[in-house]
Amino acid sequence: MKHPLLLCVLGAVISTVFSAEPPACDYEHDIRTYFCKRIRDVFPNIFYGNYHLQCEQCNIRIFTNKTFPFSNSLVSFNVSESAIRVITSRAFSSLSNIQYLYLQNNIIEDIEPGAFAGLRQVYEVHLENNNLGKIVPGFLDDLEANTVDLKNNKIKHLPSGVFGGSLGVLILDLSKNRIKTIEPDAFAGLESLEVLNLENNELCHLTCGVFKHLSTLRQLNLADNKLSKFTVGTFSGLTHLTSLNLANNSISAFDGNILIPFNHLSKLDLSRNGIYYFDANSVHVNVPTLRVLRIDDNLLSCIHLINVIQYFKKVHVEVVNTVGRYHVQNVIGIACTEIILNHSVDFEQFLKVAEEDTKKSISYC
């Protein structure tokens, strides 16, 4: 005979016992890693050597300088997927030796100024896949890191001085956010930055001189935004840039004069825009260092495209194509039409015209 009430009581007791299990950290020698489980407020006070730490089944919510206050020699600290919402000031002050800090896949909404203060040897700080709607000036204060990854959050605005106080960041990833505006001095404090990724945001305008603090920048990715035109001076200050990605924006007429600030640019990606006229000579005159160019999936006529490619061959610029529209009328796999456009149209419509031109060109025996 079954006793439902007894079973329910027994289940509740078992659940309570398991939920009441204390936090614990076990060390696995083979992979030199501490696996810490059921952390809520404070990690266990044990010896933490020159190894890695990974949190499992953790629910920390607010990470403060009391969450992990112990002396240690940890190399990496992984509290991803730990339900963290808030990181307070000097939260990681006891982790001065770590090289990798994993905070991705939490629900972080707020990072206080000075949250990473004291971290000097960090290669990577992972903050991707969180709920950050904004970042405040000083949140990277007193941090020195190779890479700071903030992609796939909900950031809408970069205020002036937001990165001020950092001691050096080489790679900053802000892709897959909702950034619409960048204030003129937003990048102050990132004077040593070499790679900036702003891909897949909602930028439709860049303030003149917005990159003036980034004289050491080598790679700038602005693909998948809503940019349509640039003022002369938009890219002033980027004297050492070698790679610029403007793919999948809304550029219809590309002005080569905006490239004047670049003294070392070798790669330029203008694919998947609405460009119907391209001044190859202007591009070459302004950036004679250019060696690789992508212009596929634009709106160029075949005769114009041929002229552009022939010109760049003469000046040793390789026009590359990774899409390969070989099923329609094309030049080196770049779709083109017999019609010369003087305005922008939807690319799918352009592709249909190219397909029709292809059918018309078929000659049957």
Image: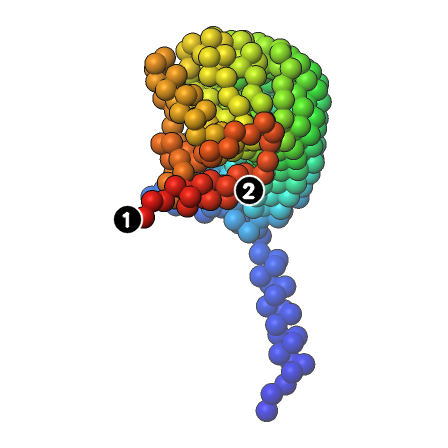
Q: Position of residue 267 (x, y in %)?
A: 43, 20
User: Which residue is rendered at x = 63% and y = 22% of the image?
Assistant: 229
Q: Which residue is mark 1?
A: 365
Q: Secondary structure at mark 2?
A: helix
Q: Which residue is mark 2?
A: 349
Q: Answer with left or right where residue 132 lies relative to residue 29.
A: right
Of the two numbered discs 2 and 1 in the rendering, the one whose residue sits closer to the viewer: 1
Location of the N terminus by quadrant is: bottom right
Q: Nearer the viewer, residue 233 or 306?
A: 306
Tell which residue pokes out farthest to the left in this image: 365
Query: Residue 252 appears in which quarter of the rendering?
Result: top right
Asked whether residue 295 is in view, the answer is yes
Q: Nearer the viewer, residue 305 or 62?
A: 305
Amino acid type at circle 1 is Cys
User: Which residue is rendered at x = 39% and y = 41% of the image?
Assistant: 361
Amino acid type at circle 2 is Gln
Query: Residue 330 appears in which quarter of the rendering?
Result: top left
User: Which residue is rendered at x = 39% and y = 22% of the image?
Assistant: 309
Asked whether residue 95 is in view, the answer is no
Q: Answer with left or right where residue 48 lies relative to residue 226.
A: left
Vertical order, 263 against 219 (above or below): above
Vertical order, 209 against 65 (above or below): above
Q: Nearer the viewer, residue 255 or 181?
A: 255
